[in-house]
């Protein structure tokens, strides 16, 4: 059996790799290939796991909140409340179905990844070049690649002729990477010039490769495996789970309290049980799934109007909860294209004649044009009159190319390439239409310093030189590339996207800290930060991250804003490290290398034009390359959360207060304060009153900071406003019994009226943390609230109510109930400042202060 291949296979001689693989420079035989195909499996990114829909449905049904609602529905049906039974089950069925349908994301991402690899590959089999499906490539195969080919697997370069690979989608490096044979001491794939990786492409030249890893063992396969893995719970899912647990505990406490006290008091067991289960149903927020779905859907529709496709409804909330945004550089903050941004002469001053000279070489050369050539020609075309005579193609042993051009009876040889390969052949500086100055040691030092300064700023430099040739010259050779005159540099950059700087600044004002997580070099990342004006602290490289434990990385990630030369799995580690410290993390990326991090983030974001893999893994896709939409999305998510929390706060506090009141009153009053059917009617009308919440407006202050499902806040609100409601309920009981001597039917009717009025009208107070009169509610919320209150009064105070056990009330009693309602609302307005005090966000403050 072949020996295991080391992860940095590019760092060992080819002979060693051949020996480890048990392979030959003449390729495998068909028999060997067939055996290895059985041993290693097919060379694909991994077929997605079959969907297990029943298991997913079961997992959803065992969520605490969903389980509580199912039990509430069953109890409602058992007690004859078929309306509540039907409503709850229909809402739950729609919610579960929506979740199951949306869980195609991981499978779609892995399938897109599998389809994106090469369809066929040219390999040596039995010493003969043979074209086979890429899925049949095995370790030990020798593959021939030319410009335009996708690399089918990971391997080492055996030979190359001017080969350049585009690895931007895997490493984040926007410039083509030169590939050549021979071991290289590189710590990361981005620096491994002797290695080729599956899923990348050859953009120039030719190469022969020895396949080292295929399928799941290749880096592509690792990304596919990460996408097939179950995504960690998002911020919304974690919050919903915590809320379900809170409701379960409150319900359990109340039911056990009522049952035990009633049984100890000698109350009938069946009546006590029915009353307790009615309280349990009354405490459950039956309409929460509906409120969440409608609220999230409205948020998604508003984002669609801004050309953002929301693939997972809960992602609207998760985007608003985000307090850290990790973003790739290439294609998200930059244009993912190379642009010519400068052309300084030897003295460092910008000179358009350097650009024009480079345009002659780029435009008249007969070889394949590189992306750098395309950037030059986008800025300038060859001057009129110049024509091609001959050229010397690019080669790695000299890392330059030359073009012999003619114009008006003269010949000019223009050379461009790496500075360290061009400068040693230069004897002077200057331009063809000027005077050449001899190049001495001081001059060479100045030119080297100029290149170093540009490189430190994250810019790529291409040296341009020239020499005159005899007027009868009709050919050019490498020997002619001597006695050159250095003209200057062409300077390139991957330009930032328009609006990126303002979008990042706006996110900062919204309390979202931006961290750049890139596969590119540290110098390029720092230059981008300076260009965008981002205030960034610290920088970690992939090599440094590789030596950090998860705990150490979590500590470093909090105070570090820049990450360079990181691999796809390291991007995911960074996301998880931040989440482990309590932060809600978004990730914005567009490449294959970004897909695992997009998958792992609370809010995974990609852009139109990104790879299929990145878009399939994302929760939302920006159709316009306007990053300002992200900030709009954050505000939209926060408005969505604010409206969901209005229902949560109202439902838990009002329901808990009323149920607590009935539980206490049932011990002191010789009859039930409300019959089971009246409890369920109270709860149903109250829930219907809140159907307008998803349409409500939100105060600007609610969108000014990151939010989250803070159960301590929900519990505090419940324990402040709930008991306040109980205090007024008990006051109502006292007035009814000792003040008016109300009979059981009058008592229940009066308390039902007072309870419905206080529960419904308090929404206009607690929908905002500001004084109620300063924040205007949406007309739909006004209509649903006042409409539900009118329906409650109609049921209780008209002959219709006799069917539910209600009785007519005298005017004086109604007036007393009205006074209690006014006093309660005044007390609630004062106490809400305590109940809704802003949280102390230790984690976020620590993050921002670093």
Image (cartoon, rainbow, N blue to C red):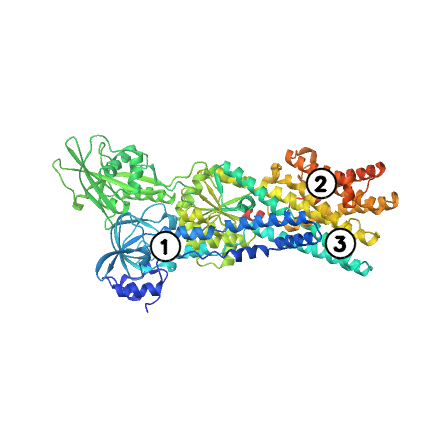
Identified at 65% across, 46% down, the residue is 648
Q: Secondary structure at mark 2?
A: helix
Q: How many other residues sit within 10 Å of disc 2, few (<14), some (14-19) or many (≥20)? A: many
Residue 611 seen? yes
Residue 275 badge: 3
Depth check: 521 or 294 in front? 294
> Which label is found at residue 760?
2
Q: Position of residue 431 (x, y in %)?
A: 24, 35
Farthest left residue in view: 472
Query: CB under 8 Å between callouts 1 and 2?
Result: no
- In this rendering, the answer to whether 346 lies above or below 674 is above
Q: CA distance from mark 3 to mark 1?
A: 67 Å
Q: Disc number at residue 189?
A: 1
Q: Quadrant of residue 299?
A: top right
Q: Quadrant of the N terminus?
A: bottom left
Q: Quadrant of residue 383?
A: top left
In this view, the residue in front, 628 or 688, is 688
């Amino acid at each position: 059996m072949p020996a295991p291949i080391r992860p940095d296979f590019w760092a060992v001689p080819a002979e060693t790799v051949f020996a480890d693989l048990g392979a030959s420079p003449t390729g495998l035989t068909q028999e060997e290939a067939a055996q290895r195909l059985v041993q290693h499996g097919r060379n694909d990114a991994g077929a997605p796991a079959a969907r297990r829909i029943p298991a997913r449905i079961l997992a959803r049904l065992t969520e605490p909140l969903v389980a509580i609602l199912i039990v509430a529905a069953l109890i409602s049906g058992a007690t004859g409340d078929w309306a509540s039974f039907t409503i709850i089950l229909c809402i739950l069925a729609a919610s579960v179905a929506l979740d199951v349908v949306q869980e195609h994301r991981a499978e779609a991402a892995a399938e897109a990844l599998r389809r994106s690899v090469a369809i066929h590959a040219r390999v040596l089999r039995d010493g003969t070049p043979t074209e086979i499906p890429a899925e049949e490539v095995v370790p030990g195969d020798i593959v021939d690649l030319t410009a335009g080919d996708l690399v089918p697997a990971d391997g080492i370069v055996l030979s190359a002729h001017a080969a350049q690979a585009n690895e931007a989608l895997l490493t984040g490096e926007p410039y083509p990477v030169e590939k050549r044979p021979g071991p290289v001491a590189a710590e990361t794939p981005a620096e491994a010039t002797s290695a080729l990786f599956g899923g990348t492409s050859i953009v120039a030249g030719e190469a022969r490769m020895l396949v080292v890893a295929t399928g799941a063992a290749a880096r592509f396969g690792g990304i596919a495996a990460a996408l097939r893995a179950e995504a960690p719970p998002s911020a919304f899912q974690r919050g919903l789970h915590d809320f379900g647990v809170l409701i379960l505990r409150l319900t359990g406490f109340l039911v056990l309290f009522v049952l035990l006290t009633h049984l100890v008091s000698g109350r009938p067991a069946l009546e006590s049980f029915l009353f307790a289960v009615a309280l349990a149903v009354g405490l459950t927020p039956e309409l929460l799934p509906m409120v969440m779905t409608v609220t999230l859907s409205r948020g998604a529709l508003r984002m669609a109007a801004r050309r953002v496709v929301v693939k997972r409804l809960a992602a609207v909330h998760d985007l608003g909860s985000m307090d850290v945004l990790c973003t790739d550089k290439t294609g998200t903050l930059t244009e993912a294209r190379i642009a010519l941004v400068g052309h300084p002469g030897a003295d460092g001053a910008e000179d358009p004649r350097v650009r024009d000279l480079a345009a002659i070489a780029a435009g008249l050369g007969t070889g394949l044009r590189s992306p750098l050539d395309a950037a030059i020609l986008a800025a300038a075309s060859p001057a009129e009159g110049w024509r091609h005579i001959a050229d010397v193609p690019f080669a790695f042993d000299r890392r330059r190319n030359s073009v012999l051009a003619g114009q008006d009876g003269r010949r000019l040889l223009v050379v461009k390439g790496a500075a360290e390969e061009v400068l040693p052949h230069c004897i002077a500086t200057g331009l063809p239409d000027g005077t050449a100055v001899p190049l001495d040691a001081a001059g060479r030092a100045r030119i080297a310093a100029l290149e170093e300064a540009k490189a430190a700023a994250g810019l790529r430099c291409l040296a341009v030189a020239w020499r005159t040739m005899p007027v009868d010259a009709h050919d050019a050779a490498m020997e002619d590339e001597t006695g050159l005159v250095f003209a200057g540099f062409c300077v390139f950059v991957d330009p930032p996207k328009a609006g990126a700087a303002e979008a990042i600044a706006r996110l900062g004002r919204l309390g979202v800290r931006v961290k750049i997580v890139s596969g590119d070099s540290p110098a390029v990342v720092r230059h981008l930060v300076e260009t965008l004006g981002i205030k960034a602290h610290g920088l970690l490289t992939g090599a440094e991250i590789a030596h950090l434990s998860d705990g150490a990385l979590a500590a470093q990630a909090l105070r570090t804003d820049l990450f360079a030369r990181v691999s796809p799995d390291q991007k995911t580690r960074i996301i998880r490290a931040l989440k482990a410290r309590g932060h809600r993390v978004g990730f914005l990326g567009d490449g294959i290398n970004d897909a695992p991090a997009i998958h792992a983030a609370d809010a995974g974001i990609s852009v139109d034009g990104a790879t299929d893999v990145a878009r399939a893994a994302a929760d939302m896709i920006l159709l316009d390359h306007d990053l300002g939409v992200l900030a709009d999305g954050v505000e939209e998510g926060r408005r969505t959360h604010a409206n969901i929390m209005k229902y949560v706060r109202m439902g838990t506090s009002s329901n808990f207060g009323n149920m607590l009141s009935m539980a206490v009153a049932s011990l002191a009053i010789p009859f039930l304060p409300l019959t089971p059917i009246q409890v369920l009617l109270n709860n149903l009308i109250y829930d219907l009153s809140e159907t307008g919440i998803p349409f409500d407006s939100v105060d600007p202050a609610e969108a000014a900071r990151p939010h989250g499902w803070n159960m301590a806040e929900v519990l505090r609100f419940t324990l402040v406003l709930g008991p306040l409601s109980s205090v007024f309920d008990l006051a109502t009981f006292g007035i009814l019994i000792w003040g008016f001597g109300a009979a059981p039917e009058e008592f229940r009717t009066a308390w039902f009226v007072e309870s419905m009025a206080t529960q419904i009208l308090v929404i206009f107070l607690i929908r905002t943390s500001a004084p109620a009169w300063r924040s205007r509610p949406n007309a739909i919320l006004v209509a649903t609230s006042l409409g539900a209150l009118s329906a409650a009064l109609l049921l209780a105070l008209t002959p219709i109510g006799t069917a539910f056990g209600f009785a007519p009330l005298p005017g004086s009693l109604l007036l007393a109930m009205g006074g209690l309602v006014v006093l309660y609302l005044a007390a609630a307005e004062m106490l809400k400042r305590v109940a809704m005090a802003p949280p102390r966000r230790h984690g976020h403050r620590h993050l921002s202060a670093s």
